[in-house]
Image (cartoon, rainbow, N blue to C red):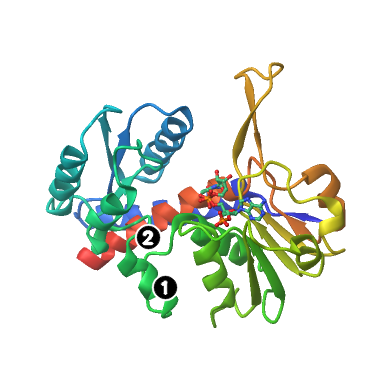
Amino acid sequence: MLILDGKIASAAIKERLKKEVEIITGSGKRPPHLAAILVGNNGASETYVASKVKQCAEIGFVSTLIRLEETVSEEILLKHIHDLNTNDSVDGILVQLPLPKHITEQKVIEAIHPAKDVDGFHPVSAGKLVQGLPTFIPATPYGIMLMLEHYNVETKGKNAVVIGRSNIVGRPMSILLSSNIKYGNCTVTICHSHTYNLDELCSKADIVVAALGRPEFVKAHMVKEGAIVIDVGITRVEDASAKKGFRIKGDVDYAAVAPKTSAITPVPGGVGLMTIAGLLKNTLQAYRQSH
Ligand code: NAP
């Protein structure tokens, strides 16, 4: 069984990005610049944004973090996005989700200029993805594709089950795996909360991508011998014995499932790290397109 290690794969990608940035700055040009907006102080969101900012610095990107109060109005948030859209020194914009209830997420997603949409959530980016056109791929599915590429995991002709149909993970993942691209060309079944025979569908799949946000949902009986299992789930589960008072759990019962697989991503240390690698690659792409 091969562990698809996000630490190793993302480090290799970041090393290559760092070299590209050195060439850019060595030629006298400014480095790529990612601007992040964080609304409120949700613990998980704080952690994700801090990690994105830190990793930008590690590879030589500039980053700006705009922190806004939980009570900020939608209007002010949209004004910040507009300012970043028109700021030529900013290449990529991300607004950390989820947002407080009084703000309409879709409005915010659509306010980001498609040329700076490094999270790939804008309908223009999503539409291009569906049509197989060059675009910003949402960072998590992109990270998974980069993981498959790093470990040269053959996907062609395989049956894949994607559990979850969100716009940020499940849906784009299903599109990528079914696309006529390297590390695509799968026959994809997409499952959701109304799927009746999910256990059976999963147990026949060569590739299972679990992106539903239910800790340890995928059990050993749902996985075929030799399957490839990608665990996207990140859920904080209370645990008084843990230093922080919680543990991060994936959507796969790793201990029981891993021995049956030919390859599997751990949580933590798998897809989460690749997501940031995907975001950084998108930011460099945005920079190159504007230069
Ligand atoms: P989401 O928007 O809540 O979507 C969850 C999807 O799972 C929905 O399509 C839902 O179906 C489906 N689902 C829920 N319960 C189900 C069940 N019992 N059986 C079958 N399908 C079920 O979540 P998300 O944003 O896609 O995120 C999914 C997980 O990935 C979360 O744990 C999240 O924290 C994690 N995540 C990780 C990363 C990373 O970097 N590793 C990035 C993003 C998200 P319906 O559509 O029918 O409701």
In the drawing, does residue 224 fall left or right of residue 194?
Answer: right
- How many other residues sit within 10 Å of disc 1, few (<14), some (14-19) or many (≥20)? many
Of residues 23 and 77, which is closer to you in this image?
A: 77
Residue 25 position within the rendered picture, expressed as x and y whole percent measured from the top left: 26, 52
Measure the C-alpha gap from mark 1 to mark 2.
9 Å
What residue did someone put label 2 on? 120
Mark 1 vs 2, N-terminal side: 2
Q: Which mark is residue 254?
A: none
Dot 2 falls on a residue whose secondary structure is loop
Residue 83 position within the rendered picture, expressed as x and y whole percent measured from the top left: 13, 46
Q: Amino acid at mark 2?
A: Gly
- How many other residues sit within 10 Å of disc 2, few (<14), some (14-19) or many (≥20)? many
Of residues 51 and 162, which is closer to you in this image?
A: 162
- The residue located at (69%, 46%) in the rendering is 266
- The residue located at (69%, 54%) in the rendering is 4
In the drawing, does residue 44 fall left or right of residue 203?
Answer: left
Q: Amino acid at mark 1?
A: Leu
Of residues 283 and 241, which is closer to you in this image?
A: 241
Of residues 105 and 285, which is closer to you in this image?
A: 105
Q: Quadrant of residue 110?
A: bottom left
Q: Is residue 259 above or below residue 152?
A: above
Is the C-beta separation of discs 1 and 2 under 8 Å?
A: yes
Q: Is residue 105 above or below residue 183?
A: above
Q: Quadrant of residue 202?
A: bottom right
* Quarter occupied by the N terminus: bottom right
Dot 1 falls on a residue whose secondary structure is helix
Pointer 1 residue Cβ closer than 8 Å to ligand 1: no
Residue 19 position within the rendered picture, expressed as x and y whole percent measured from the top left: 40, 55
Q: Quadrant of residue 291?
A: bottom left
Residue 201 position within the rendered picture, expressed as x and y whole percent measured from the top left: 76, 67
Is residue 72 visible to the viewer in this orientation of the structure? yes
Q: Which mark is residue 129?
A: 1
